[in-house]
Amino acid sequence: MLLRGAPSFSASWFVDFDWPFADMIEFINVSKAFGSKVVLKGFNLKVNEGDTVSLVGFSGSGKSISLKKIVGLIAPDEGTIRVDGLDVQSLNRHELYELRRNVGFVFQFAALFDSMTIAENLAMGLLKAGGYTEDAIRERIEESLRLVELEGFGPRLPSELSGGQKKRAGLARAIAFRPKYLLYDEPTSGLDPVTTAVIDRLILRMRDELGVTSIVVTHDMRSAERISNRIAMLYDGRILEEGTPEELFRSTNPIVRGFVDGRPELVEQGNRELQGLSPDGSMP
Ligand SMILES: Nc1ncnc2c1ncn2[C@@H]1O[C@H](COP(=O)(O)OP(=O)(O)OP(=O)(O)O)[C@@H](O)[C@H]1O
Ligand SMILES: [Mg+2]
């Protein structure tokens, strides 16, 4: 359990009992608007232990804000996000901190501190958390860099790394706490196909060697097919379709087909159907 034994957890009764929720991340009827722009409207998604779920969708559909809600960076207007049964919105500061150690976040643009070396970037969270000796921190950094195939890169500055290496360094930082969950926001965007395949292999490695459960936000359907056991497509504020990669690739939903095949005319057709209009746009 994520927070089992956390000393200041208010519902301490569950430390001694079996927590009745399975290990999972769950979005329940989540809605979110920014001003008059409604981004999520009754968004539901379950990610079970061991899953690697790719969350796909058009630019601006709300993928990044969905990930940020899991670690309490953005609050929903309505609905609940549960991690291992705990409502993220109800956590106090200490519990939220504990949650963030267990849910590693690989940011869309790596988000490394430019003036610090890669090792310092990785060490920062561990130092802040306390309880690690200098040797333990050094060991953890070396192991994390080895896992992302960046051995020996600790003394370098982020500016000395390529785009793909920066993404890997961001991943190394996210795994420094050995989290139970990993959230990847566009881990391969802007990378060439070979570097993309390297990152995909690392995502699989995190699953196999660290046993993490992941959500991967991506536009890249080939990546999604390689790395995930399930794909969920976010559209118009909710999950339009989810299933195995094979199921998504065989979908007959015109919007899913349009997204998978890059065919805007199918998306337009699907939109008309969603609005209850006939294929030519007139009322049926
Ligand atoms: N802090 C904010 N204030 C106002 N609007 C926001 C904020 N964060 C996100 N939005 C809006 O919410 C919508 C969803 O944003 P989000 O970043 O989640 O999209 P996305 O699906 O990740 O897109 P992309 O694929 O381009 O990264 C966008 O229209 C965006 O402009
Ligand atoms: Mg995004």
Image (cartoon, rainbow, N blue to C red):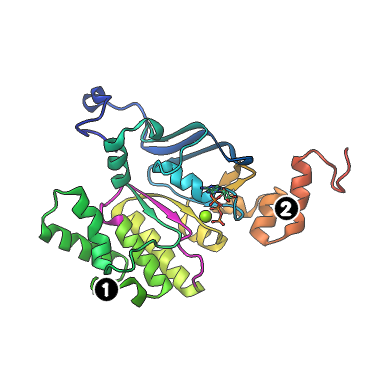
Q: Is residue 182 magenta?
A: yes
Query: Horizontal placement of 268 versus 212: left or right?
Result: right
Helix or strand or loop: what does disc 2 sit on?
Answer: helix
Q: Quadrant of residue 83?
A: top left
- Report the quarter where the C terminus lies: top right
Which mark is drawn over residue 267?
2
Residue 266 higher or lower than 202, as above or below: above
Q: Earlier in the sequence, mark 2 or mark 1?
A: 1
The residue identified by callout 1 is: 153
Q: Position of residue 18 (x, y in %)?
A: 28, 26
Q: Position of residue 119 (x, y in %)?
A: 24, 66
Residue at 36% x, 54% y is 207
- Residue kind at label 1, given as amino acid type: Phe
Q: Which residues are magenta?
A: 175-191
Helix or strand or loop: what does disc 1 sit on?
Answer: loop
Q: Main secondary structure of the magenta part?
A: loop
Residue at 32% x, 66% y is 148
- Disc 2 to disc 1, how far (Cα)? 44 Å
Residue 254 higher or lower than 167, as above or below: above
Q: Position of residue 50 (x, y in %)?
A: 38, 46
Q: Label 1 crowding class (10 Å Cα cut-off): few <14, some 14-19, many 20+?
A: some
Q: Label 2 crowding class (10 Å Cα cut-off): few <14, some 14-19, many 20+?
A: some
- Residue kind at label 2, given as amino acid type: Val
Residue at 43% x, 55% y is 184
Residue mark closest to the camera, 2 vs 1:
1
